[in-house]
Amino acid sequence: MRITVFGGGGFIGSNIVDRLLRDKHEVRVFERLRVDPYRQFSDSEKVLWMTGDLTSMHDVTEAIDGCDVIVHLVSTTLPKSSNDDPIYDVQSNLVATLQMLNVMVSKKVKKIVFISSGGTVYGDPVYLPIDERHPTNPKVSYGITKLAIEKYLLLYQHQYGIKANILRVANPYGERQRVQTAQGAIAAFLDKALRKETFEVWGDGTVTRDYLYIADVAEAFSMAVQYDGSESVFNISSGRGTSLNEIIEKIESILGHPVERTYCPARPFDVPASVLDNTLARRELGWEPKIDLDTGIQMTAGWLRSQVRERP
């Protein structure tokens, strides 16, 4: 298939693009201006790297024209900062996605796979694990915008026949995660620990999340691209909860030495626990996570060590 991946150059996107190329799809990667390819592609890989502005109808039309499936991974905001400017969040993410959907209608593209947020769209859990029918009460603009995009995707599915698959991904970690943004506890903690630097833990360390290795995320998208069933919304998760203190203990065990950390006041937008039920994805997509947490942390540590060696 011919697939356009919006946001295919980042941590999650690059891993998905690599998986789609291994599946022998023809891939267009759409990234922001001045973003260079994350690696050298081989002559046998059918990939076109494009740059542009997601809010530009011209750029988006050029990226979509002639494709079979759209994979939408772009977000201009982060959960921890989205409340600072919710108008920007809506304009740059929700409005831009509506323009993308209108281009899909005009170009007769009939499928989109969208990355939503399993960690923010649900809000405080009413029960655990959280399934797809759990109430959605986001506590941050990021989650509200993701949920609004989901609703519009389902509207366009009903009105125009565009098949929408929405993947509510838990907390991904692994190779190519940007530790500089401190987005993702495992990679951020590991990076500091490898440098023997002190890192900050928000709260008392009991905050519990559902961590999923990036290769498992990429496989879920690979399967969603080809899914033709009746379901639309899927939790993509390990189905297991792990606290920050447990993560730290695992890092200490893997590295073989204690790590320095300081505990800071809890952040008001952090829900105490988020563990997602992945039963529907297992049944409908035929997907299941394969990399356990200890193995994933070991592989992430190995990648981070290689990055330190490559730096001048």
Image (cartoon, helix red, strand yellow):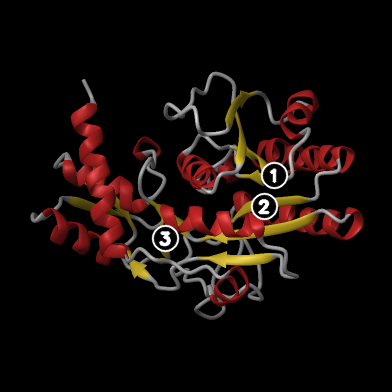
- Corner quadrant of residue 234: bottom right
Q: Which of 115 and 217 lies nearest the eye of the viewer?
A: 217
What type is the residue that disc 3 sits on?
Leu
N-term mark: 2 or 3 = 2
Point 67% across, 62% down: residue: 227
Q: Position of residue 155 (x, y in %)?
A: 84, 57
Q: Position of residue 153 (x, y in %)?
A: 77, 54
N-term mark: 1 or 2 = 1
Residue at disc 1, secondary structure: strand
Single out the residue that lies furthest toward the front. 44
Q: Is residue 239 visible?
A: yes
Q: Which of the two marks, 3 or 1, is nearer to us in this view?
A: 1
Q: Which of 176 and 271 lies nearest the eye of the viewer?
A: 176
Point 8% across, 54% down: residue: 257
Q: Which of the two marks, 2 or 3, is nearer to us in this view?
A: 2
Image quadrant holding the C terminus, namely: top left
Distance of label 1 from label 2 (alpha carbons): 6 Å
- Corner quadrant of residue 127: bottom right
Q: Name the residue under label 1.
A: 70
Distance of label 3 from label 1 (alpha carbons): 23 Å
What type is the residue that disc 2 sits on?
Val
Distance of label 2 from label 3 (alpha carbons): 19 Å
Point 36% across, 49% down: residue: 174
Q: Is residue 290 above or below residue 195?
A: below
Q: Mark 2 points at which residue?
A: 113
Residue at disc 3, secondary structure: strand
Mark 3 and mark 1 residues within 8 Å of each other at the beta carbon: no
Mark 1 and mark 2 residues within 8 Å of each other at the beta carbon: yes
N-term mark: 3 or 1 = 1
Single out the residue that lies furthest toward the bottom. 127
What type is the residue that disc 1 sits on?
Ile
